Amino acid sequence: MSDYYARQRILPEIGPEGQQRLAAARVLVVGCGALGTVQAELLTRAGVGHLIVVDRDRVDFTNLQRQLLYDPSDAQERRLKAVAAAARLRQINPGITIEPRVVSVGPRTIRGLLRGCDLVMDGTDNVETRYVLNDACVQAGLPWVYGGAVGTQGLAMAVVPGKGPCLRCAFPDPPEPGTLATCDTAGVLASAPVMVASLQVAMAIRLLVGQDEHAGRLTSLDPWAGRFHTITVPRDPACPCCGARTFPFLRASGVATATTLCGEEAVQVTPAQPITLGLPDLAARLEGAGSVDLGDDHVVFATAEHELLIFADGTVLVNGTRDLDLARSLVARFVGS
Ligand SMILES: [Zn+2]
């Protein structure tokens, strides 16, 4: 085992001192999907001393095409992603500490998860959680590495509070609900999230060994088109987050509310702000992800396990569950947050 990090230690960019810094680091990986599984495996093999992997979902067969830590038995047994990922990571490197957390990441839980960490990896699958991460990390002065991938494309940027821009300097507000493609509606080529996650880990290792001059470089890539492009995002002095230090996404009221319906296996999810959904466009985007029925004032969308009744004002009735976080996450995945 003493040779585990030999090829990394002889890299001039890392060296014995960098390797020691990695061993002393505590990193939070938020989400164990396509991005998070690759991040976690690379950070595990790199020798990050303490890795916390967070996810509330279970493995299913549609994950296996791109979520590299899982195999069919995990999907067959419907194992919790955080637990299955941790078991595999411990096999890969028994010399470090892996801590699985089965938690829904949101305004109520994020600050507890960040405590004691040196860096946060974005492995989430929805925009809402990224704005929560940005608010929480800027408030705490903690670096985090943004990443996202859908279709054949992806984006990555390291956010270092006080040294460079934050997510809201680059993208001031989340996109309008229902306007953004998600992996569930648009599909995803595995190469895109694997490249994004790999780039995020390179950014993370740079930061952990003490090199932060790449903060604020936003890279977009498309492995299908063979395109890789980096721009420098300026810090916005008027940014509501890192400038004015307001953190609206940490208030539970800033996100969609979810309530169970009395006596029914159903949850109603109400958007945070009044919105109007383009139902025909939404219905067209959901084709292929499940069965879709477009009505005058609603869309009925059904997967194998759940049915979403989606209204033009953004209210969604999620049938087949009483779990508020699951309902909110289904709405974020299929309707957008
Ligand atoms: Zn900012």
Image (cartoon, rainbow, N blue to C red):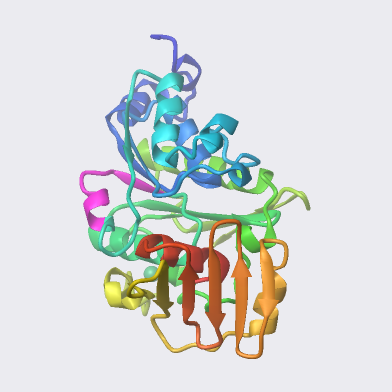
Image coords of residue 243 (percent x, y): 31, 74
Q: Is 113 on the left-hand or right-hand side of 76?
A: left
Quarter location, residue 84: top left
* In front of the other: 168 or 13: 168
Q: Is residue 161 left or right of residue 282?
A: left
Residue depicted at x 63% and y 67%:
181
**Horizontal and vertical percent for residue 185?**
65, 63
Say which quadrant the N terminus sits in: top left
Residue 236 locus on image (x, y percent): 41, 74
Count of residue discs: 0
Magenta highlight on residue 311: no
Q: Is residue 118 magenta?
A: yes
Q: Which residue is drawn at 66% across and 85% down?
A: 295
Quadrant in which residue 63 is drawn? top right
From this view, report whether residue 6 is shown above or below residue 79.
above
In this rendering, would 59 be left or right of 62?
left
Q: Give the range drawn in magenta.
A: 111-121
The residue sitting at 62% across, 46% down in the picture is 62
Q: Where 314 falls versus 14 (above or below)?
A: below
Q: Could you tell me which residue is drawn at 62 percent across and 42 percent down? A: 66
Above or below for 23 versus 267? above
Please state the horizontal and vertical placement of residue 24, each as a whole percent of the image.
27, 30
Q: Residue furthest front?
A: 263
Q: Can residue 210 be seen in this view?
A: no
Residue 149 in view here: yes
Q: Quadrant of ligand 1?
A: bottom left
Residue 84 vs 268, above or below: the answer is above
Which residue is more in the foreground, 52 or 102? 102
Q: Which residue lies furthest to the right in this view?
A: 225
Relative placement, left or right, of 324 versus 229 is: left
